[in-house]
Amino acid sequence: MPPTPENTPAAVGSSSVSISFILPYPASVVSVTLQYNHLNDNDLVGVGLGDMFTAPHLFDAPLAALTMTAHSLAGFKTPDLPTSEDGWQDFVAEAVAAIKAVEADASSLPPGATVDIMTGAAAQGLFINGVSADEIPDLKDLLPAFLRPDGDVEAREANQGETEGKAVTGRDLDDKLAPQPQDAQPEQASEVPDHDFDKDFENKINNPWKVDAGHQVVAGANKQLNEFHVASRWLDADVIAVKGDTVYLDAISQVNVMGIGDIVSGQVATLPSQAMNVAEIVTKSSHSGEAATGPAGLPSNSATVRLEASVTQINWAHQYNFTTDNDVAAITISGSNTYFGLGGNTEFNEAFLTQIGFNYDLIMVGGNLFDVTMLTQTNVLLDVNWIDGAETADVGDNLQYNLARIETTGVDTHVGMGAHFNEALDKFGSGAKEITDAVAHDALFAGTDLLRVLYIDGDFTTVNVVQQTNILGDVDQVRIMQSAVEGAAAAAANTNAAVSVVAGSNAQVNIATVRDLGLDSIVMTGGNSYSDALIYQAGLIDMDAMPDGVEMATGITALANEAVAFLSDDMLSTHVTAATHDAISATETYTDTAGQSDIMQTVLA
C-alpha cells in the first residue's frame, strides 16, 4: 500500500484559517491472462480402414502450411511482454516501429489473398472486410445453418419449462418405478416387441435416447471461441502535462485463412463459407451534451499528491484454440434410425475485466506517457472432405469471424507546453510537493474551486494487448454402406429416413473489446508526440485445398463384402440376440488418437 499522503495546506486562504485536504494515491494494475485449449479428436470407425483411407496424421502438414500462411499475412507482430517495469519504453518503441512498417505489398501476398489497411484518421469508424459499415452484423445470423437454433430446439426448451419449479420427491419416483399390473409380461414371447420410449417420457422431459428419423453422421460442426472484454475507468484528468514523450497507438490486425475442398460421390461439391473481419475504432467526447458550467472564478484551494514511482496499467491476454477433427468412418446402415457423432467439439476461452481508479483535475508526469492498444486475431481452417454413399452431404458452410473494438470515451486535445507548466514540472523533479501558484491560477481551471493535482515521478503507461488464435483441421473421410443388411434400405425408406453427413459447418470466432472510459483532456507534451491508429484486415480462401497425392480409395465393393462377412444370419432378423450383440461388438473399431475417455466427442472449457 502507498503511504498516506501528507496534508496539503490550501493554496489560497486567510491567515486565520488553515484547511488541509487529503487525496488518494493512484495504484498500478497488471492483468495477464493465458488461456490454451489443445484437442486431437481423430476418430476411426469401421473395419478394414487401413487400405481404403488416408491416415489422419498426414493432414497435419497441410494445416501447418495454412497456419504459416496466416502468420505471413499478419499485419504486425506484438512485441514480447517485458520482464520488468523498465522494459515498457522498449516495448512501445518496437510497437511504433511495427505499425510504421505495415504496408500493402501485393507482390508478396499469396495468390488469392486480400489485404485492406486503414491508418490514422481514416481508421476511425467501423469496417467489415475493408469496407466502411454502419452496424456490426449479428453473429447468430452468420452461423452455419447446422449450428443455428431451430424450431425443434425451441420446442424442447418449451417442454422443459413446463417442469420448472415443480419439485420431484423420492416417493414420487418410487411410485413411478413400482411394478404395475399392466406392466406384467407374458410368460412366453416369440419375439421382443418394439418399445415406445417417447410414450414413457410423454411431454415432460427430453428422451435422452431418442434418435431422429434417418441416418446422420456429424463429422464437422466444431466450434472455437475466444472472447475478451475489458472496461476501464482507471486514471485520467482534465489537463495532463508530460515532461517527456507521449505515444498514443490503437492497432488491430485480423486474418482469416481457410482451405476447403470437398468430394461427394466423386464430384466436387462445396457450399459457400464466410470469412468476416469486423473492426471498429471509435473515440467520443465524455460530455453527453453541453459542457457543465460552474463558478467563473479560479481555484481558491488546491491539493497535491506526489507519487515517487511510475503508474502502470497492463492488460495482457493470449487466447489459443487448436483442434484436429480428422475422422475416418466406414459405416454400415443396419437400422431405421442411426446417429454418429464424430465431431461437434467445442473449445472456448473467455475473460471479462472491469477496472476502476481515480480522476484528477491535473496530472503532471515527470517521465513519459504511453497509451497503446494492440489487438491481433487469427483464424485458420482446413476443411477437406471425401464423402461417399450419402444421400445428402453438408460440406462447406463454415464461418470465420473476427470482431475487434477499441472504444475510447474522452477526446484528447494536444497543445504546446506552457512555460509555467514546464517550470512546475522542473520544480516537481527537484522535489517540490505543491503545485505552483501560476499553474493553480491558469485559466484552464476556471470554474474549479478545489484543484486536485497528481504528480507522477516516473512514466504513466497504459497497455492493452490481446492475441486470439483459432486453428482447426477438419478432414473427414466417410463412406456409407446401405445394403450390407437385408431390409435396412427398405426400413429407411418406410420412415422417409435419408442418409446425411455433416462434414463442414464449423465456426471459428474471435471477439475482443477494449473500452477506455475517461475524460476530455488537454494534453501538453514537453518531448516528442506520436499518435496513430491502424486497422489491418486480411483474408485468404483456398477453394482447391486438396492435399497433393491424398485421396480416398475406391474399394467400395471390397468394403461391402468385408462388412457383410462379419454378419451372422440372425443379424438379418427383426431383433438382435445376445450372441449377435457380442458378434457386432467384436467387429467394431473405435480409436481416438488423443487418448481421451470420450471417444466420439470432446468439450473443452
Image: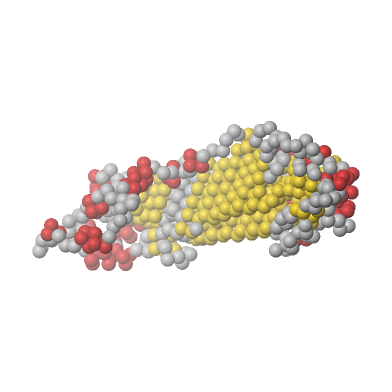
Picture layout, residue 112 above or below residue 26: above
Furthest residue in direction left, as rendered: 187
The residue lying toward the viewer, choosing from 237 and 326, is 237
Q: Quadrant of the N terminus?
A: bottom right
Percent position of residue 369, x then y: 78, 50
- Which residue: 76% across, 46% down? 450
- Which residue: 21% across, 59% down? 176
**Displayed quadrant of residue 412:** top right
Seen in the image, is 581 located left or right of residue 35?
left
Percent position of residue 34, x then y: 60, 60
Seen in the image, is 381 located left or right of residue 521?
left
Seen in the image, is 372 located left or right of residue 479?
right
The residue lying toward the viewer, choosing from 298 and 518, is 298
- Which residue: 42% across, 63% down? 598
Q: How many marks?
A: 0
Percent position of residue 502, x then y: 41, 48
The residue lying toward the viewer, choosing from 34 and 437, is 437
